[in-house]
Amino acid sequence: MRAVTFSKLLLSACLIASTVAACATRPPASDPAAVAEYEETNDPLEPTNRVFYVINNGIDTVLLRPAAQAYRFVFPQPVRNGVHNLLSNLSTPVLLGNDILSAKPRRAGDTTMRFLINSTVGVVGVFDVAKDWGYPAHDASFGTTLALWGLPEGPFLFLPVLGPSNPRDAVGFGVDTAMDPFTWVGQGAAVTALNWSRYAVSAVDQRERVLDAVDQIKKTALDPYATFRSLYRQHRASEIEEARNDTRSTVPVWFPQPTPAPKR
Amino acid sequence: MLTRRILLKLTGAATVMAALGPMLATPARADSAQQAAAFVKSTGDALVAVVNGPGSPADKRRQLQQVIDANVDVDEIARFCLGRFWRQATPEQQKQYMSLFHDVLLNNITAKLGDYKGVRFEMGRAQEREDTDVVSTTVERPNNPPTQVDWIVSGASGHPKIIDVVAEGTSLRLTQRSDYASYLSRNGNKVEALIEAMRHQVAQNG
């Protein structure tokens, strides 16, 4: 099944990693500015990571990017939006689980209302009606949940197939997969095929959404690897901060409202 | 009664403030966020007008340069992006780097012009953060999901100037700095190597 395939994938990744493992050399203590930069970059496994960056980049160039381009060429924006909304709706169980685990009741409420509204009025999730009704979308993953629990991110990792990550997000990805009922529900060739199509469409959808941005970076960055590393880490940090700062209270509307916390 | 006296003073002060009107009652800093928002709105309108307006790419490039020079503190951004290497560079290198940085930035923005055709933006909230103002906007362009873009405005130079753009939580200048830092560390930390690479970039795009 899928979970097994992924653990196999991760295992083989670890094996490859250990055979090509190499560490970035830490600058001497006599150069504090360089040491500070080394610490800030948080990439002690850089040489290994770069190997996987090159491999992933190759896979992307021959497979994922052309697929995303074809997808954009064939389907107009409204269709692609519908597909994206549908996929988001399918990830409700994982979202809700993480909203609850990270103790964000209002986010859990948003997720529930979004599912109820979009699954019905939004025609099984194709239209994001809930957004206009005051239930905006948000991201949640077990990686973020772990961060809110206080777990540090660990060193930067560039994983085969999955791309930029860190131990916390890699574990989070595994847990999210395990948390997803679609990983476990039903059996037989049809279900497996459906599940895999969902992952494939999901990958193409994600890739299509960043087509222009990634092309631009590869064209303009002197060191695309370092740029993607920086972007990933900044983006994750801001996602986590956004979740952390979502401290909306759960007082019912008819109850005297507490004074809102001052906005940062 | 100390507290009573303070209370009296405070009410007295409040009355004076109220009497003098909102001009004095509002501390100078409080509306700086609003000023920054107005500044970002006018800069954004100017940029959108260039992007969606008529004219050849060369015309647009010139217009963009005007908008950027007037509203973006490119020198400050350039120094930030070179980080600790700015002080290691010779004055001559600093000059070359600075001029190349202006060109690279303009090239990168000009290269995106086509992608941004039909762009529009909506203003979000503005707030103070440390000595800068952060103005949030939502940028929408065809074929792309809406993007949350924050404009960091500094008044340090006397006039409001944009010193950073943060798209979906990623800072433009922080990203650029890590790109340069990584390139430098892989090329013997020699500023000359970076300048050479930038020169190559400009020659390719120019």
Image: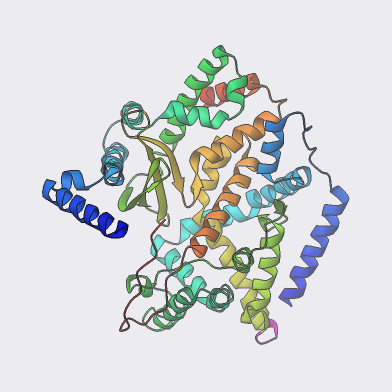
Q: Residue furthest bottom?
A: A186
Q: Is residue A105 above or below residue A242?
A: below
Regarding residue B206, the answer to whether it shows in the image is: no
Nearer-the-camera pick, A106 or B111: A106
Image position of B64 (left or right of A22): left
Q: Which residues fall within the magenta stretch?
A: A185-189
Quick check: is A132 in the magenta stretch?
no
Q: Residue furthest top?
A: B92
Examine the residues drawn in magenta and state their main secondary structure.
loop
| Colour setting | rainbow
Q: Residue furthest front?
A: B1
In which image quadrant can residue B31 be found? top left
Residue B111 drawn at (x, y percent): 44, 35
Q: Is residue B14 above or below residue B73?
A: below
Image position of A79 (left or right of B53): right
Nearer-the-camera pick, A186 or A93: A93
Q: How many marks?
A: 0
Q: Residue furthest left?
A: B19
Residue name at image x 43 percent, y 83 percent: A116
Location of the C terminus of chain A (image quadrant):
bottom left
Residue B19 drawn at (x, y percent): 11, 49
In which image quadrant can residue B71 be found? top left
Residue A262 drawn at (x, y percent): 38, 60
Residue name at image x 77 percent, y 42 percent: A47
Residue B152 drawn at (x, y percent): 40, 42
Residue name at image x 57 percent, y 16 percent: B93
In which image quadrant can residue A5 be found? bottom right
Q: Is residue A89 above or below residue A31?
A: below
Location of the N terminus of chain A (image quadrant):
bottom right
Residue name at image x 70 percent, y 42 percent: A39
